[in-house]
Every structure is written in structure tokens, then in C-alpha cells.
Image (tube, coloured by chain):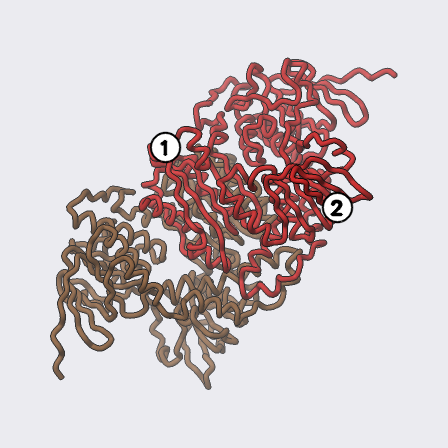
Chain colours: A brown, B red
Amino acid sequence: MTQSPAQTDTYDVVVLGAGPVGENVADRTRAAGLSTAVVESELVGGECSYWACMPSKALLRPVLARADARRLPGLSRAVQDALDVEAVLARRDGFTSDWKDDGQVDWLRSTGADLYRGRGRLTGERTVTVTGPDGQRQVLTARHAVAVCTGSRASLPGLPGLADVKPWTSREATSAKAAPGRLVVVGGGVVATEMATAWQALGSRVTVLVRGDGLLSRMEPFAGELVAEALTRAGADIRTGTSVTSVHREDGTVVVGTDGGDRIEADEILFATGRAPRTDDIGLETIGLEPGAWLDVDDSLRVSGHDWLYGVGDVNGRALLTHQGKYQARIAGAAIAARASGGAVDTEAWGAHAATADHATVPQVVFTDPEAASVGLTLAEAERAGHRVRAVDVDLGSIAGAALYGDGYTGRARMIVDLEDEILRGLTLVGPGVGELVHAATVAVAARVPVARLWHVVPSYPTISEVWLRLLEAYRDA
Amino acid sequence: MTQSPAQTDTYDVVVLGAGPVGENVADRTRAAGLSTAVVESELVGGECSYWACMPSKALLRPVLARADARRLPGLSRAVQDALDVEAVLARRDGFTSDWKDDGQVDWLRSTGADLYRGRGRLTGERTVTVTGPDGQRQVLTARHAVAVCTGSRASLPGLPGLADVKPWTSREATSAKAAPGRLVVVGGGVVATEMATAWQALGSRVTVLVRGDGLLSRMEPFAGELVAEALTRAGADIRTGTSVTSVHREDGTVVVGTDGGDRIEADEILFATGRAPRTDDIGLETIGLEPGAWLDVDDSLRVSGHDWLYGVGDVNGRALLTHQGKYQARIAGAAIAARASGGAVDTEAWGAHAATADHATVPQVVFTDPEAASVGLTLAEAERAGHRVRAVDVDLGSIAGAALYGDGYTGRARMIVDLEDEILRGLTLVGPGVGELVHAATVAVAARVPVARLWHVVPSYPTISEVWLRLLEAYRDA
């Protein structure tokens, strides 16, 4: 069989992957007047739009709003009954545009970027070959830069026969059309805790199997503790220190064996056990890089040793979060444009072309009930990094705004103060409705606002943000 | 009748008024080891605890949580019915401790301050005479300072016969034991809009009469517009450009006449038409000051021309907000202590003894549906102050986090950027759930964080805080 000769087109910039990160790189290079090609093998909009942030938060939002209402006597009786699960799932489907990408394609085209549908692989320096759905090949050469924005995928453990079980990953967990009767969740991180929260509320009986000794182990210890307590109260069965040793299906039922000798039956099993970079099949070997590895980049997101190659978003492993990938995309796009035009490139800390916030200034919100939100370093991380710090804790239930928010409000905040400069290194908040509070801490950490000035930053009464005052008092009086 | 001779006691500091402001002054002077007397004629805890912030927010919180739930298909049917009004009122009663102050008295005594119940009046330099409920008089002399923290009261217009109508002020509106069938609200500020929102949702038919051309006239114009639209949709009747010209009761019914010739009947009428300082009966004339006037103070809250006299909180008219009064109290307490000990007094801008944030860095949250939150200057205020600024607006409904928050999310944000220094002068947010977002802006305004650094302050996806990114983009692309 003869293959038709590949077409060749030349662009200033070629972007591999049209998730939020690739979209934002293209937006910035197009704004700078650079011709830009974007290659996507699946849906334009990427993991976040269809199988991660958007559908997961659409599933969780009504769960959290119901939890809020349940804490208020004037509403609690009305919302005791189960959620209208069909309505929740239909709303989720709306937020994923029923897994169609027309809207995002329109947006991408409106930037003036050209979209190539198909699998893109590097085939040498500044060269990407796209194999379309029809097998047609197209060679794209980049005058200035290739940006790899292919993201990450769920990483599954090497259990024999696992594929036959058809396990859920984050994709199936966020796009399922109905709640399984029994769901086993393997893992204790963000995906595991969010999906356990959602499906337990939507009708599943959830069992969470965590290898470590708690949930959300990258945050302050109380985050995982408070989320585990709430999940347990909601009816989930959380087993820590537990590894899965076997899994198979018997007459459709998933049977899970653990290192503790447990046998657990379920209708579905979700593996939320980490992520791997989608760099295994993009031709890295053609330019001397290792397929399947995270891309090693500098603060302008440029790959070491390749002045035309950028690795932006999950693929570089700096911070696997949509917002941080978009931040990197804005910076990479600006750096590509500056270098292309021979303009000034500012890669000093906090400069226009340095993703400085990736270092110890990354925010994260976990949409569980209670929510967990953090920015910067935990106490353990700060100490490991060699900072001389003090941690101060505040019981959120003692804040008037929190008590008003809902009866029996339970939560905690921890502020990490660097004792050398008296600036914040990190802040963690756990409690209902705290997700929007963390941004104030992100400003304080990124701008290195001194504690003495934070005393003049008055929180409105009675908001939950008054926790800031209590944290400063706790620091002063410690 | 002979009066028993007055007892005399001497303290380092005498505080007039035991609201949140007086409590915080005493807390700070006690922490500095100064003996402190606190005089209170009503309940310890003050207006905020019993007739303002706490009960109003307790009434509003279930209303806003229901509004949130109504925007979510999986919950909306369950919460269509009216709120359980009795449960809402009972919860409100809990937050006011049924208008008993034992808890607050215990807290005040735990600081080591002495509480004097009765009416306190200045009777000369450094001298306060307390007339107790039994008529007994007690003279308190202050070695270092007298802090006047008597707050403000509702200011009623001079309408003939108004007293006979027994109109509601903020006190009755927040403490009412049942929803009136028909309620007329006079005024368009925070108290008016919050109480209209609460009572309309709790069963009253509310008519709002506003003299000006809109609500919340101290905020950006869109705040009042969005709140008025939502109140109207909720069933309230808002009449702008309308002044009350007469009011009386006929067989118990309130009859209101307006300058437009309207005749409105109601069961109760709330006047939310401004505040007056509670300085008319505290003996200001004995030290050469004018009774009933706002106290003129410097940034350390000291009254001009009286080095021993402080005016803290509402009485100085700088910013009539509990949180700002508490801020002033912390600073005044520290300044009193520093001066008493002969220590260093730092009244430079943003120093430990200067309430610098009172100037153009005051945050406020209005707990209506939608919420309205702001800090710093509006566009009009910034221009009046002579700053060269640019305002950028963002439609909050376009933010993924807002769309997820609730269907049909409607809101708006405006950022005021100073074009000289590229720092923020102000930010206003209007929309459901934005109350906790304003603190990030307060950090940015108070710490003068440059726009270039704000680009590195990454908001978490998908939170409503992503409005920050859109605002920066709007500024960049303007």
C-alpha cells in the first residue's frame, strides 16, 4: 500500500495539544502576530473541559450547596432528601457540551490559529508530523518554537488482569452516566477525595483504599483528617494503610483483594493513583529525549538543550493543575514571542517570562465537603526547604462569619510565617466555603507582603475571611 | 433628696462603650498591662452583636443559601417552598444570645478590665462619671487616656408625628419576632438593601423608597443596579427618586405619603436613612467639644487638641463599619499603650499606630442576593481624588467558576488601576458568593502590589477568583 506524500506547512509556532494550556500558548503567540498551528488528537479543550475540572466540579457543586443548606435550620429539612441525581448529571453534561468541542474549536479559530486534527509527533528539530484520522500525514515546521502541551494521563498500577476489569480512571469517574451501587476508590489524593465525595452523595456506597496513612497527603495533615471525617460521616468507608493486591470481575462484580486480606466487592473501581506525562508517543526520541519522561524545562518553560522546544503544563511535572498550566502558557507564549521578535526577555524572578509562581506559590482548591485550599508551602515543606518558620493554627469554627455560614461549622486554618523576613510562606484552609479565600493568601505569598502590613489588611465583618485577623493574633501572641 | 457622694477610682485607661470597638481597645490596653475600666449603658457587645451585623447576617444567610440552591437543578425543586421562617428567626435569636450579654461580660472580665454598668459622661479632663442603673454615681479618672467608643445610632428624618408611628430602625429590623405582612423600607444603603432582601424572602411584601436614583449609591453604579434587579425579581417594589413627605398610622396601618403623590400602606416602616454619632450625651461640652458632633481624630485616633482623648469607631465618622472600628481599636489601643510607656510611636503611613487603611483601603460586603463587595475607591472617587486611573470591567457570568456556582449566574467586577504606579486603587465585585473574594483585593490595595506582580498571582481553576485573570487581561488588552 502506497502512502500519499506528506504536505508541508511552515508556521512560526506549532503547539502540540489543544487543552487549556495549548489554547493559551496559541492565544498569546497569535496575539503577538505569530502564525500558529495547533495539533489535537482528541477534543479541543482537553482533559480539563471534558474529563476533569469542569465535569468534576459540576458534579460536586450541588453536593456542596446541599451540604451548606443542611447546616442551616431554615433550609435543612427541605434538602434532607437525596439530590435529584438525573438533574445533576444532566447539568454536568451541559458543562462538557455533551463531549463535543464545536465551541472551543470556534474560539481557537477566532484567534487565527490553524487547527490540525490528528496525532502529532516530533520528527526532528522544529518538525511535527500530524497523522490525521484518515491516515493522511502533514508535516509542520516551526520557525521559532514547538510547544508540547500534551498533558498527562492517569497512571495505573501494574496489577495482573487489571485491564480486564475495565477500571475507572478520572475520565470515567467524571463522565459516568449513572452512580454505581458500590464504588471502590483507590488513592487518597484530589481525584480520589473529590470523586468519593461526589459519588457517595449521588447514591454510591463508596469505599476508599489508601496506601498511606491519610487523605490529601500533600497538604497539611489536618486537611486529610477533616475530609476523611466528613466522608466517613457521609457514609463512605475509608481504609488507610491499605494496598490493592488483586482485582478481577466475577459475573460483572469487581472483587478487590488487599494486603490486609480484605475482600471487597463493588460495581466499579476507580484508580486515582497518580498521573503520567503524555510524552510516550510524541517522537521525543527523534530529538534525543526520552519518551514517557517529564520534560525538564527552565522558568521560561523551555526544554533544556533545545532552544526551540517548550514543555508547558502537566508535561513538565512542575505543578499538575489547570490554572498553573494556563499560567505557564501565558508565560511561555510571551517568551516565545519575545525571543521570536528579538525583544527583551525577562527571566528574572517574577519577570514577565519566568513562571516563578511555580516555585512555592502554587494554589490549589479541593472541592470536597469541607473544601480544602492551600497555597505555598506546608509546615513540613517549609522546614525541609530550610526556612526558619512558625506555624500558627486557628479553629475556623471560632470565626463569627464561619458560625453564621452554617451550624456546627468545622474547619481549620494554618499560616506559615517565615521568621527571617516576616512574610508568609504558605496558608492552608479547610472548611465549608473556603475555596475563594485562598486567593488572598496567594497575593500575600507572591507579593511577599510583610506581616506588619497584613495587620492593615482589614477583613470584612462578618466574613470567614476574618480568619486572617485570628491568624495574625495567633502569630503575635505565640 | 440627698445624693450619696460619688466614689472615685483611678485607671490607666477608661473606655466609654463596650461594643466591639470598646472591647478591642480594652483588650489591647489590658494586654499592655494598663488598668482599664469599661463603661456600658446597654449590652456588652454593642450594636453589632445584638442589633446589626450578627442578627442581620443570621437572617440573610439562609436566604442567600436558598438562592444558591435555587440556581442548581439538582436542588432547586427541593428549595422552591418558602423558608422555615420560625427556624430562621430562632437561629437569629441564638446568634444574639437572646439579647443577653453574659458571654461577652465573661470575655471582657477575662481580659482583666473592670466593667461599669451605667451611663458614662465626661465631667472634665481625664474624668468620666458613671451614673448606674440605681442612680449611684462613680467617678473614674484616667491616668493616660479616655477612649470614646460609643458608636452611632440610626438618624431619623424630621417628619411631623414620626415618633407616633413607632418606625423601625436597624434595631427593630434585625430583632423583629415576625415578618410584617407589608414593610416599607426608606433608604437605599446597606441597611435598607439587606433588610429588604431578608424580609422579602421571609414573607413580607417590601416596598423600598429611595430618594436618589438608585441603591447602594456609594458603590460602583452596577452594584445598586444588580441588587435592585434581583430585589425586584424577588417581588419587592423599588421606587427611586422618591421622598417620604408624611407618615402616620390609621387603625394600626402605616400610611406613607411621598413627594410623587403616592400613598402606600404598610404594617411597618423601616427608616434606614443614615447614622448619627452617639456623642450628644457624653459630656463633650465639659471639655470644650460640641455634643452630637463626629469626633475629629488623627490617624492614631486621638482627638485634635486633647492628648488624652481618643475617638474610636463610628464616633469619628471615618468608616462606619464594625471591622474598620475594630481595626481602629487595635491601633488606638497600641498607641495608648506606646504613649503610656513612653515607647516609640509610629504614626507614619502603615505604621503600627496609624489607621492608614481608613484612607481609601476600606472593604465592605453587602449580604444581599447578589452580594456586593468592594474595597478602596470607585472610579468616580478615584477621579475626584485626582488619580489618573483606568477602570476595567468583567462580566462574572463569563467565568467558569461562576457558571459552575449556579445557573444563570449574573454579576460584574470592576478594577480601578492607577496608571502612574500601575497599582490597584479599588475593586468592586457584585454576584452570588463574592463576599469572600474581596479580601484578596484588600491585600493588593493595602500592599500596593504592582499589576506586573499580580500576573503571577494565579487563581485556582475553576473558582470565581479567576475573575482576577480576566480583569488583568481586560486591563492588558484595553
Question: Relative to A53, is A32 on the left or the right?
Answer: left
The structure residue drawn at horizontal position 32% and vertical position 50%, both measured from the top left corner, is: A358
The structure residue drawn at horizontal position 28% and vertical position 66%, both measured from the top left corner, is: A278
Secondary structure beneath dot 2 equals loop
The answer to whether residue B430 of the structure is visible from this angle is yes
Q: Going by the picture, which residue comes out furthest to the right?
A: B1
**Pointer 2 chain:** B
Give the class, few, some or many, for how many residues have Cα within 10 Å of label 1's Cα (few <14, many ≥20): few
> Contact (CB < 8 A) between labels 1 and 2?
no
Q: In this view, does B416 lie above or below A105?
A: above
Q: Going by the picture, which residue comes out furthest to the front?
A: B261
Same chain under badges 1 and 2? The reply is yes
- Residue A386, percent from left and from top: 34, 43
Residue at label 2?
B267
Query: Residue B388, which numbered label?
Result: 1
- Residue B424, percent from left and from top: 39, 37
- Residue B100, percent from left and from top: 73, 40
The structure residue drawn at horizontal position 12% and vertical position 82%, both measured from the top left corner, is: A2
Nearest the camera: B97 or A334?
A: A334
Nearest the camera: B396 or A86?
A: B396
* Quarter residue A211 falls in: bottom left
Going by the numbered disc 2, the residue's amino acid type is Asp
Going by the numbered disc 1, the residue's amino acid type is Arg
* Quarter residue A323 falls in: bottom left
Secondary structure beneath dot 1 equals loop
